[in-house]
Amino acid sequence: MGAERYDGLFEQIRELVLCHSPSGAEEEIDAFLLARLKALGVEHRQDDAGNIVARIPGRDPGRALAITAHKDEIGCIVKRVNPDGTVEVRKLGGSFPWVYGEGVVDLLGDTATVSGVLSFGSRHVSHESPQKVHEEQLPLKWENAWVETKRSAEALASAGIRPGTRMVVGKHRKQPFRMGDYIASYALDDKAVAAVLLTLAEELREPAWDVYLAFTAKEEVGAIGAMYFSARQKPDALIALEISPKSREYPCGSDLAPVLVSQDSHGLYDEDLNRELAAAAQRAGVPCQHTILSQFGSDASLTMKNGHVPRAACVGFPADNTHGYEIAHLGAIDNCRRLLLAYCRNA
């Protein structure tokens, strides 16, 4: 069977990627997810923190497992709108201007979306121009960039562009790119795992425990949605579905194998739960690998660190260029689904 085996998964991720969802401005992805869960006929709700939670009744309703996939993406937040119609932004989550590069971005105004161009200034300049120093000496920061809209400040105000408005990479350049069995795209960090969670909602029936599939809000700015959900739902265990960065500092022997994380910036994960997940992977015929990560956190590590859950784990798919134009094997994303199905059915 050729690359077409992943066509359905690619299309599902593509639809999700094209739904803007910067942290705290997630209405577009919310509408998509709510409509999809309704069509699946799965019990679901949206809570006061913005999480969308589906419940799959289990054989032992006295115990509960939560699986989270955050639905927000990194982006920027508007700091000021200048009189000349240029817009200054600051990071929202782990975004960097040099990763996005000059190109179309979308400003999600209160009444309209305005597209502009993230700009760093002309290259044909000398030391008399402030951007010259970024060519050879200093890193480019958000303070050195701006969004060129070619609109008046009054027109931007009419569209609801103001301090606090969110900015994301424009849909003009957000279409995922297929590379055989690989997918390359912005926002795989959240949209690929959201696709896995949707598939679990469709396929998972009569798991060992009650399973809560939580599409969490505001993860990129501190796992705010997951903290709210876990404090109230109090699951017996929580598994975060995530992206896993590929780098020479982390052992990663296979692009196809899901990653079980033992430690990240916020602390340790539960090794007993990791062993159970590894056993489920073996039952499903899915390879897996282990790592510890730096400069990384998840719904799982933050909720366990804060005492909301007794056990937590993080299952990720390996990816290049995390928090940038990410590249991942579609088979690894699908293997996360297979692993979690095996675990839920026999936990």
Image (spheres, grey):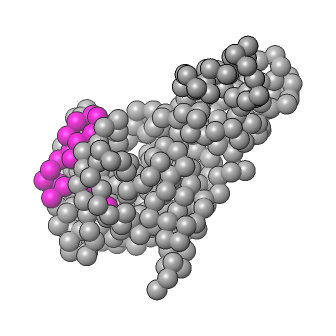
Give the x, y percent position of residue 307: 22, 35
Q: Which residues are magenta?
A: 258-275
Residue at far bottom of view: 1
Based on the displayed image, in which of its 4 quarters is residue 35 positioned? Answer: bottom right
Q: Residue at x 49, y 66 (%)?
A: 182
Which image quarter is the C terminus in? bottom left
The front one of 213 and 170 is 170
Give the x, y percent position of residue 175: 65, 57
Q: Is residue 76 left or right of residue 231?
A: right
Give the x, y percent position of residue 285: 25, 76
Q: Residue at x 26, y 68 (%)?
A: 287
* Residue 49 in view (yes/no): no
Q: Is residue 39 left or right of residue 109?
A: left
Can you say whether 200 is above or below 165 in the image?
Answer: below
Can you say whether 207 is above or below 54 in the image?
Answer: below
Q: Is residue 115 left or right of residue 312?
A: right
Residue at far left of view: 272
Q: Is residue 177 magenta?
A: no
Q: Residue at x 83, y 19 (%)?
A: 84
Q: Residue at x 15, y 50 (%)?
A: 271
Based on the displayed image, in which of its 4 quarters is residue 85 positioned? Answer: top right
Q: Is residue 259 magenta?
A: yes
